[in-house]
Image (cartoon, rainbow, N blue to C red):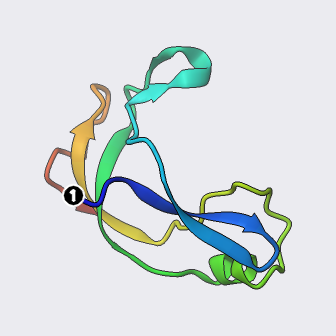
């Protein structure tokens, strides 16, 4: 298995693929579960114009920013307060 990876903005004109932890249904800064959230297994992703700006160094993004928000994923975990999405759904 490839693990959990993401593309990270390093500095103007430089990004890199990094290994990251798998997400959990929790809000760590508040030390509690995220009952209204879901976790996805990404099945497809695209590059967005804002991602291209980071790659080209034309951004105000902080160093360490994770790129990517154009995704389709399968729901693999659902918080207890989620009403209209279920495990196995494909969402974008």
Q: Position of residue 54 (x, y in %)?
A: 73, 75
Query: At x 68% / y 77%, what residue is drawn?
Result: 50
Is 5 on the left or on the right of 90, as rendered?
Answer: right
Q: Does residue 47 sit above or below 86 in this rendering?
A: below
Q: Position of residue 28 (x, y in %)?
A: 54, 23
Which image quarter is the N terminus in? Answer: bottom left
Quadrant of res 46: bottom left
Q: Position of residue 33 (x, y in %)?
A: 41, 20
Quadrant of res 92: bottom left
Query: At x 52% / y 81%, what residue is drawn?
Result: 47
Total labels drawn: 1
Is 2 on the left or on the right of 61, as rendered?
Answer: left
Q: Could you classify mark 1 by the number of other residues whose Cα lies within 10 Å: few (under 14), some (14-19), or many (20 or more)?
A: few
Q: Position of residue 78 (x, y in %)?
A: 26, 36
Query: At x 86% / y 66%, what residue is drawn?
Result: 60
Query: Can residue 92 be seen here?
Result: no
| Residue where numbered disc 1 is placed | 1
Query: Can residue 26 be seen here?
Result: yes
> SS at mark 1?
loop
Is 18 on the left or on the right of 62, as rendered?
Answer: left
Toward the left, the furthest residue is 88
């Amino acid at each position: 298995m490839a693990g959990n990876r993401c593309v990270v903005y390093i500095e103007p004109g430089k990004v890199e693929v990094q290994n990251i932890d798998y997400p959990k249904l929790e809000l760590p800064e508040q030390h509690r579960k995220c009952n209204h959230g879901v976790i996805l297994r990404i099945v497809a992703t695209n590059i967005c114009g804002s991602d291209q700006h980071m790659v080209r160094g034309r951004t105000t993004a902080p160093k360490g920013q994770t790129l990517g928000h154009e995704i389709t994923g399968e729901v693999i975990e659902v918080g207890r307060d989620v009403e209209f999405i279920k495990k196995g759904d494909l969402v974008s």
